[in-house]
Image (cartoon, rainbow, N blue to C red):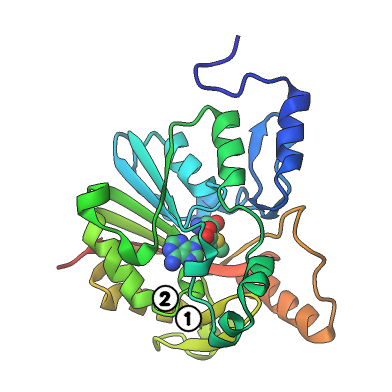
Amino acid sequence: MTEPGRFDADEQSLRAAVGGNALWYHTIELRPGVVTPGWFDLRSIVERMPWPDVAGKRCLDVGTYDGFLAFELERRGAREVIAADLSDHTRWDWLPESRASGPDYLAAIAGPDKAAGFKVAKNALGSSVQRVETSIYDLDCNRLGTFDVVVCGSILLHLRDPLRALEAIRRVCHGLLLSAETIDLALSVRHPRAGVARIVGSERLLHWWIPSLAGHRRMVHVAGFAIERSTRPYAIPFGRGHPPLDRSPLERTRRAFTRLVAGNHGIPHAAVLARPRV
Ligand SMILES: C[S@@+](CC[C@H](N)C(=O)[O-])C[C@H]1O[C@@H](n2cnc3c(N)ncnc32)[C@H](O)[C@@H]1O
């Protein structure tokens, strides 16, 4: 007997479904012993995020990818979870050089179907999370309603206009925003109080800006939120599926610095819990 809605195939079929998805972003335990080979593994840091009480609440996860944070909201007792993402990579904020290289180039960088992993995970977990296709910029309460809690993770750095994105979130957020973003540790150490960001312009990684710790807080503030809680830097560990790491001396030094400041190996992040102030 399986729970209603739960993936009722045997373990071999589930493993085949996991193997059939060419790229897993998230490491998700779908069943004891069946874990997706994600690029990133949020399991050990999820408790470091400043979660509000989401029990009985209507929640939104923006830029969900394989859905790890949306499933976490559901696990924490949310009444309803909407997982928003933009699978159509032609609508992502590409740098001008990337777009000029043509559609085949963009498709190769963007990777395969962005929704495939979410579907496998949703089935396997017997989840009720609903995935909707929308750009963060187009979040609209007439279409999606409003939310008690909005979670937005590791996406602002991929956007040319992160403040417009935060303003769009504010339109649908009537309660709390949990914003968990990549930060630049060196900038954070050098400018502990100033709201600064590094303009990256990385074509392959689609990175526009990476703020300092204070820069991330400032971005959330100027987009119309009051910050209630915030974390110290933490690092999101690489998962089993991540491509081999760059072993150059510069990258090794960067990784040692991350371990020193954030406490572990991975991509430096910080998170805030904030409430619309206007
Ligand atoms: C780095 S992943 C973050 C995954 C997840 N939120 C997390 O924190 O682990 C970035 C996600 O943003 C999505 N994305 C990129 N541009 C977007 C846009 N304009 N609107 C909505 N989602 C977008 C991508 O499809 C991808 O799922």
Number of labels in the image equals 2
Q: Residues within 10 Å of mark 1 (few under 14, many from 20)?
A: many
Q: Position of residue 65 (x, y in %)?
A: 54, 53
Residue 143, which numbered label?
none
Helix, strand, or loop for circle 2?
Answer: helix
Q: Nearer the viewer, residue 35 or 129?
A: 129
Q: Which picture quadrant has residue 174?
A: bottom left
Of the 4 image quadrants, the one containing the N terminus is top right
Position above or below: 113 against 31? below
Q: Mark 2 — residue?
A: 216
Q: Amino acid at mark 2?
A: His
Lateral position of residue 243 relative to residue 158, left or right: right
Of the 4 image quadrants, the one containing the C terminus is bottom left
Q: Residue at x 84, y 82 (%)?
A: 248
For the residue with label 1, is its CB less than 8 Å from the closest atom of ligand 1?
no
Q: Residue at x 56, y 78 (%)?
A: 207
Lateral position of residue 171 relative to residue 81, left or right: left
Q: Position of residue 182 (x, y in %)?
A: 53, 71
